[in-house]
Amino acid sequence: MPRLTDAARKRTFLGKLWALTAPFFISAEAPIALTLLVIVIAMVLAIVYVNVQLNTWYGDFQNLLQAKDLAPTAVAFFGHHLFTVNKFLYLIGKFALIVFPAVILSVYSTYLRQMLSIRWRRWLTERFLGLWLEQRAYYRLQIYGGGTDNPEQRIEDDIASFTDVTLQLIIGIINKTVTLITFVSLLWVLSGPITLPLFGAEITIPGYMVWIAVIYAVVGTYVSYRIGRRLVRINFNQEQYRANFRFGMSRLKENAESVAMYRGETDEHRGLMGLFTAVWTNWWELMRAQKSLAWFQQLYGQAGGIFPILVIAPRYFAGAIDFGTIFRISQAFGQVSDALTWFMDNFVALAEWKATVNRLIGFVEAMERVKAKEPEIRVSAGDGMASLEAEGLGLALPDGRKLLEDLSARIEPGDRVLISGASGSGKTTLFRALAGLWPFGKGEVRVPSHVEALFLPQRPYLPQGTLRRALAYPGAPEAFDDAAMQAALHLVNLDQLTDRLDESGNWSMSLSIGEQQRLAIARALLLKPDWLYLDEATAALDAENEQRMYSLIAEHLPNATVLSIAHRPEVARYHSRRLAIDPETRSATLSALATR
């Protein structure tokens, strides 16, 4: 799982990039990954060799066209004469023999690189999901305000971009490095020395076209960097603004019914356009930055086609080199220049890639940061402990405002406790603290060990997928047969769903909130938890149905410990004790209830 140590956090960008990249290549995937990488690199090297052969072929072909040479040439194979053909057709056949392998190498090098990319993406996605879910980091990021946004974009979009572009960059660097070494030596030999007068003397520069190519590339790269360096920041902002816009639309979709009831379309439109305005404004800044860079890159690229010919032309007109050689020098100069200006040509891609890496690194650091925070409320589970105990428990909001002070209480197995208090007094926050989710406050909570607990909030979570999965969540659907599931649905008056267990859908949208709450109660009857926490889990039901749900819990979960938040006074009859919160004194009292 990708983690950044303290030392890694203090390192440079390259150090953090290494901490993000290296684990894959030393994982269980390493043998296949390294094999694929080596094969792709070997193919890239082979393509460079083919380019050298093409450079020679083009020189011969240009000389043939200039000389109009159609002399017969013998075609042999391992010393055995096959047939005779004119030189033009011979060179065309040789071209086909060179290019066909190059096509195969190009296609399969891309295919195998993509194969490696998707394997790396799957591995990273699995690790990031684990990092996001473990120790409830997904929840703690929201509670603490972890300094990162849109985790779904980081895990889906950014990982896909990171793996694909990183491999492209690695292969590109290797390709251009080998190309540079190969064609520098070729250009050195082809261009030869040049003698120039200097202060009354003569100076000879060997391989002078190599030095010209270096100067040409260095100037181009420096100017490109100066023009385009702000693209890193702009691309980072663009991805963040786009993600915020997508998230706003997702929230509208998730809360479609509420928005429709409020007739809030005008406000939603205004809010979404506000988010898109940030995308729009930043996009114009991105366009202007890319336009400035494109001006230079286009001029530089067009000049690169004619510049080497202008430099080498005097030697050609002097008869020092033939027409084929000037073509080979021009092509070799282009290969060297392209290799040296690789950074300039890929500046936009590098800027986008660096922004992606920064987002992934920021996401990892944010998750590690919230996991490292010590909660102010200590939660422990002692061996053999059967009761739930709160000692000196105080609850506070993230801004420091206190909700509850010095609660000490003990809840025994089998207790049925009703938590009551005015709205905003901290009832749900108390639930979160007892669940080990709420970090703000003080004191200690000791929870029973080796028991199954189930929390049912006011709006149940129904995962997308089959109804079977939604009913059994968070248990495994295959652990329950159809008869048990249908019986649970029947008990909560959801008979219309009994024959839809294998139907997939967005159940949070297709079921009313009352049906969702009854489905959650059916879930409790199915899972049979030892401890059941009900946070206004029946608030959307009418009084008769609410009492029916509590009756079902009492009948089918007789040994379960139940803690519930509910407002109707009739619910008290299903509880044996009351934990009353007084917001004025920020205190809570646990007392017995008279049951009927």
Image: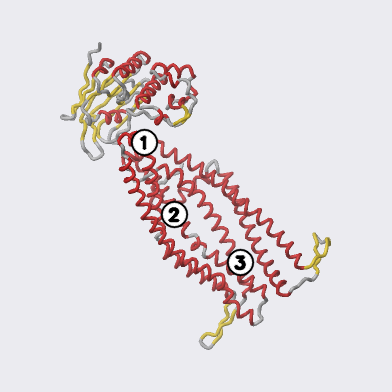
Which residue matches tag 3?
183
| Amino acid under disc 1 | Ala
Which residue matches tag 2?
354
Q: CA distance from mark 2 to mark 3?
A: 30 Å
Q: Quadrant of residue 253?
A: top left
Q: Is residue 450 visible?
A: no
The mark lying in front, picked from 3 and 1, is 1
| Amino acid under disc 2 | Lys
Q: CA distance from mark 1 to mark 2?
A: 37 Å
Left or right: 286, with 326 as reference point: left
- Residue 222 in percent (x, y) is at 45, 67
The residue positioned farthest toward the top in the image shown: 596
The mark lying in front, picked from 1 and 2, is 1
- Label located before the other in sequence (3 or 1): 3
Left or right: 346, with 371 as reference point: right
Q: Secondary structure at mark 1?
A: helix
- Residue 198 in percent (x, y) is at 52, 85
Q: Is residue 317 visible?
A: yes
Q: Is residue 83 above or below residue 145?
A: below
Which of the labelled discs sits on residue 466, or is there none? none
- Residue 594 in percent (x, y) is at 22, 13
Q: Secondary structure at mark 2?
A: helix
Count residues near mark 1 (Cα–Cα under 10 Å), then give few for <14, some for 14-19, many for 20+.
some
Q: Residue at x 51, y 71 (%)?
A: 216
Which residue matches tag 1?
256
Count residues near mark 3 (Cα–Cα under 10 Å), then give few for <14, some for 14-19, many for 20+.
many
Q: Is residue 427 above or below residue 269?
A: above
